[in-house]
Image (cartoon, rainbow, N blue to C red):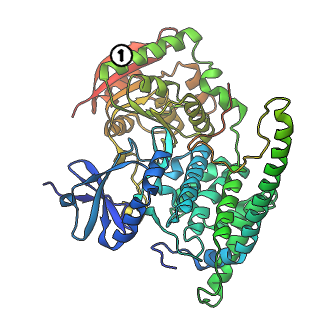
Amino acid sequence: MSEARPVPGSFRDPAGFVFEREGILYRQVDASFADRFDRFRSSGLEAALVEEGLLVPHQDADLTLAASPGAHAVLRPERVPFVSYPYEWCFGQLRDAALVTLSAQRLAMSRGFNLRDATAYNVQFLRGRPMLIDTLSFEPIRQGEPWVAYGQFCRHFLAPLALMATRDPRLGMLLRSHLDGIPLDLAAALLPRRARLRPGLMLHLSAHSRSGRKAAGGPARGRGDRDFSERAFLGLVDSLESTVRGLEWEPPDSEWSGYYGDCRTYSADSLRRKEGLVRELLAEARPSMVWDLGANTGRFSRIAADGGAFTVSLDSEPGLVEVSYRELSRDGESGVLPLVMDLADPSPRLGWAHRERMSLADRGPADLVMALALVHHLAMGNNVPLPALGRWLGELGRWALIEFVPKSDPQVQEMLALREDVFGGYTEEGFRSAVESSFEIVRRELIEGSDRSLYLLRGRT
Amino acid sequence: MIAYIDPGSGSYFFQLVVGGLLGAAVAVKLLWRRIWAFLSGRRSRTRDAEGPESDPIPRSNDPAPAGRTAHREG
């Protein structure tokens, strides 16, 4: 049997951990958690959560597959096609993840159970919906005790949602610098004055953060001198849910039309031709996993998904990702996962020993990376030399589908209007030689009605 | 309290302090629902003679379909 490789981000909870063996993902349940785990299963809560789409389904696996001694059970969870992190989600995704966490807590409470953690990293997107992935998050309620995960829920969900909805959606990125959620005193300080007057935010962020400071400075009090009733618990979850539901954010109108609704680059005809070519070239590579880099509202991501590939649709603009997410939800399209990512600064490795959260490249390579009208943004907007860009694309994908936009293009001319043209190497010939270090050119197609071209590239290794 | 994450002493005591208020809010909500149910029951009995109509009880806390935001058409 091949060696078990523990997943680096799964080390906090002594109840169990996740590991890989022969490319298959397993979760080991530790003997110390046996009683609580067996009660969770026999109560029917596990089945109810899976049925409601709140928890990732899993099968029982053979105990001999355990990664270490002392295992009570080994589970094989359904694998999510692409692991994503809260700092990559748009507002709507984080809001839905918060509501799923609260729905799971509510269902658990109705059967005498509780979530023992409420980290946003326990939520992943499967079949287009957020759901909890950690089967070990549930334990029987301890009568009279408050919710152990309340502070974590507020830091991981409520604080970023409140800042995104009432201040600026880009503040979701604070989750990247604060892996255990945004400190409540920081969130309270950044909230606009009017938002601080909303009862839910006043209670769960402002007052809650002040209690944290007092407790930190004051003497430790004994526990058990007061009880937290079942009704208070229900009230807490009700209040959190209505506070989350009360937070809304609408992308600016310009982003509903997206790049394509108000497209100056392509006529309707040449856009159709480009779509046809993209479909045709994707069919030639037959990828199962596509990363659409600089996806805008995901028009071409959906073409890739139509062709049978699971498509990760990355764009740096939270409003565009929000529009994409809502449209996908509306249409029940589960083959595309839209995420917020600045490709000039893609998600790095983060957390303990640089291994807790994966970088974008760690999650690859994709079968195919698609970069339509992106190269000039990175090469000129961010001064990335073409050879470096070629190598980077070679690390991310086994195949690549790239649109090259020449300097004569009106969009490039606009980008260069107010700056010195220091991009002497930015030519189609320069592009070809840059990508040829990692790829062979399989096809090159000019998009009729424009001076742009599409390249289908196959990795050399 | 036994937890593998640090629940934060502030968060712990804060819940104990506001627990009464939150519990009272639930009690009021349940009472209000009962009053609504009672009144709408009486009303619907009257209306049954005239024809069916939609349920007026507020459902603000019913779980929404998971993973779906409100959609804007267009």
Residue A363 drawn above or below residue A72: above
Quarter in which the N terminus of chain A is drawn? bottom left
**Label 1 neighbour load within 10 Å: few <14, some 14-19, many 20+:** some
Secondary element at image label 1: strand
- Residue at 72 percent across and 31 percent down: it is A253
- The chain under label 1 reads A
Residue nearer the viewer, A231 or A441? A231
Q: Please say if A347 is above or below A262.
A: below
> Residue at 73% across / 59% down in the picture?
A191
Q: Which residue is mark 1?
A: A444
Considering every residue shown, the one lying at the far left of the view is: A1
Q: Position of residue A410 (x, y in %)?
A: 59, 20
The image quadrant where one finds the C terminus of chain A is top left
Q: Position of residue A218 (x, y in %)?
A: 66, 88
Amino acid carrying label 1: it is Arg
Residue that appears at 81% across and 34% down: B48
Q: Is residue A453 left or right of residue A342?
A: left
- Name the residue nearer the viewer: A90 or A13: A13
